[in-house]
Image (cartoon, rainbow, N blue to C red):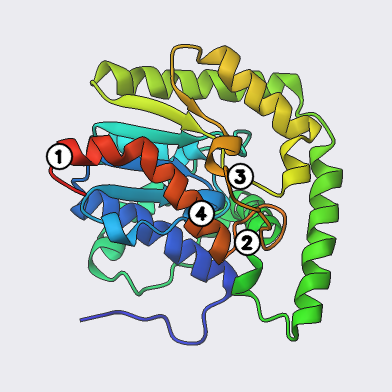
Amino acid sequence: MSLFQLGPDTATQRYWKKNRNTISNYIQFSKVPVVFAGSSLTATLDFSDETECVYNIGLIGESALTGLDVIQTIGHKPRVVYVEINFPERESNTYLISNANGFLAKNFPQFIYTPPVNYAVSLLSSLYHFIKDAPLQTVDLGIDSDKELARTNEIALQKETLAELMPSNVLATKLSEFRAKINDLEKKGIKVIFYEMPVYPELSSSNQVMQVRRAFKESFPDNNFISSAELANGISIKTVDGLHLNQDDVVGVLSNLKDFYRDECRKEGYL
């Protein structure tokens, strides 16, 4: 039995449902030893060949903080959590987690939520990130030349945005939040490894990206860190919009990434 909302769903509702179901499925079914927590950049990674070993909590419009809260509070406790450092300024979406752990999400996954009025401000913020970060392949842009023009424009916009440093107080606050959540996971015996998703090469050396990269390395000197350069090794990263990997990028990045989690999966009898 399934429950559907009458009428066509909006782009906002589709992304909301995808995020909710990603979390809900993890809470209900996942017992994997390796988990990735991140934003829509991580969501582009397809671990379908390792579904028994790896779960991807990559969420559109969110940061890794939301995924960490799922694992920390109500989710299965894996052996290793890989934490994406891109977009650390975003808040953990506790409302999304609550809905993902609710009756409707567990019993009627096709139902599309319409968030209540008192969630409007937070939703608008998430919608901004969705529009800003949504992979272009999800949008019908018409002929190839239009897609390339849109891609070029998106890259130019990201260059302008990432040229600005993140306010130091915002970054410091978020690093403190990461520290608290990660300390809790590590006390439970969970190993935490940081990674930086590759973006368009020119953006990898932008002021804000370098600022965040440096801040995480300095704040978590005892944790392993997988750089975007390591994940992009041997690959010509093109992306669809400056931020999100295209299909060829994903294949290459996954091949490089597997070198880091392969041993853990083998310990558990996978791969």
Residue at 43% from the left image edge and 18% from the top image edge: 223
Callout in the foreground (1, 2): 1
**Mark 2 vs mark 3, CA separation in Å:** 16 Å
Residue 250: x and y in percent read 51, 57
Residue 204: x and y in percent read 71, 39
**Mark nearer the N terminus (1 vs 3):** 3
Identify residue type, mark 1: Glu
**Mark nearer the N terminus (1 vs 2):** 2
- Position of residue 244 relative to residue 199, above or below, is below
Q: Please tell me whether mark 2 sits on a helix, a strand or a loop.
A: loop
User: Which residue is the site of mark 2?
Assistant: 134
The dot on residue 252 is: 4
Judge whether residue 168 can be spotted in this image: yes
Quarter of the figure that contains the N terminus: bottom left
Residue 22: x and y in percent read 37, 57
The dot on residue 198 is: 3
Crowd band around label 1 with a 10 angstrom C-alpha radius: few (<14), some (14–19), many (20+): some
The picture quadrant where one finds residue 146 is bottom right
**Mark 1 vs mark 2, CA separation in Å:** 34 Å
**Mark 1 vs mark 3, CA separation in Å:** 28 Å
Callout in the foreground (4, 3): 4
**Mark nearer the N terminus (2 vs 3):** 2
**Mark nearer the N terminus (4 vs 3):** 3
**Mark 1 vs mark 4, CA separation in Å:** 25 Å
Identify residue type, mark 4: Gly
Residue at 35% from the left image edge and 52% from the top image edge: 23
**Mark 2 vs mark 4, CA separation in Å:** 21 Å
Is residue 131 shown left or right of residue 81? right
User: Which residue is the site of mark 1?
Assistant: 268
Callout in the foreground (2, 4): 4
Q: Nearer the viewer, residue 229 or 204?
A: 229
